[in-house]
Amino acid sequence: MKKINPIPEIVGETTDVESWLMRAGLRFSDLGDDAASLAIRKQWREYQAAVHRCCVTLHQLPSRVQLSGDYASLRIPGAASTNCAIACRVRPQSLD
């Protein structure tokens, strides 16, 4: 079946919480004090730590790296799995 409105591939990582939340169709104002919101906040901290380690290791900006492997689940809020090894790669540069 053909997709009518395909979701563009998420490329590169971000240091902006609003951009990260938009990947799951959320806004910061949607978060409260419930268990799901607390889990998303914890995931944000794990995501930022993973992005920082990748950037330092690869000597790249967040927009030029992409989490992969077990850590790829941190890229989308609510899809986290904890205690994983970090895998990251340099995103290919576009010809634009």
Image (cartoon, rainbow, N blue to C red):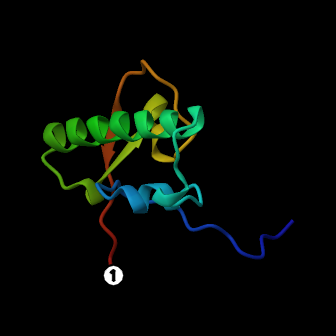
Please state which amino acid type lies under the numbered disc 1: Asp
The answer to whether 51 is drawn above or below residue 82 in the figure is below
Q: Quadrant of the C terminus?
A: bottom left
- Residue 74: horizontal and vertical position, in percent? 46, 39
Q: Total number of numbered labels?
A: 1
- Residue 37: horizontal and vertical position, in percent? 53, 40
Q: Secondary structure at mark 1?
A: loop
Q: Is residue 73 visible?
A: no
> Which of these two is toward me, 48 or 41?
41
> Which of these two is toward me, 51 or 88?
51
Q: Is residue 62 left or right of residue 75?
A: left
Residue projecting furthest to the front:
33
> Which of these two is toward me, 22 or 62?
22
For disc 1, the neighbor class at 10 Å (few under 14, some 14 to 19, many from 20) is: few
Residue at the image point whose x is 37% and y is 55% from the top: 17
Q: Quadrant of the N terminus?
A: bottom right
The answer to whether 44 is drawn above or below residue 60 in the figure is above
Q: Is residue 48 left or right of residue 36?
A: left
Residue 84 location, quadrant: top left
Residue projecting furthest to the top:
83
- Residue 12: horizontal and vertical position, in percent? 36, 57
Q: Is residue 91 left or right of residue 57?
A: right
Residue 94 location, quadrant: bottom left
Residue at the image point whose x is 53% and y is 62% from the top: 9
The answer to whether 12 is drawn above or below residue 96 in the figure is above
Residue behind mark 1: 96
Residue projecting furthest to the right:
1
Residue at the image point whose x is 42% and y is 18% from the top: 83
Q: Is residue 43 left or right of residue 63?
A: right
- Residue 30: horizontal and vertical position, in percent? 55, 56
Residue at the image point whose x is 52% and y is 26% from the top: 81
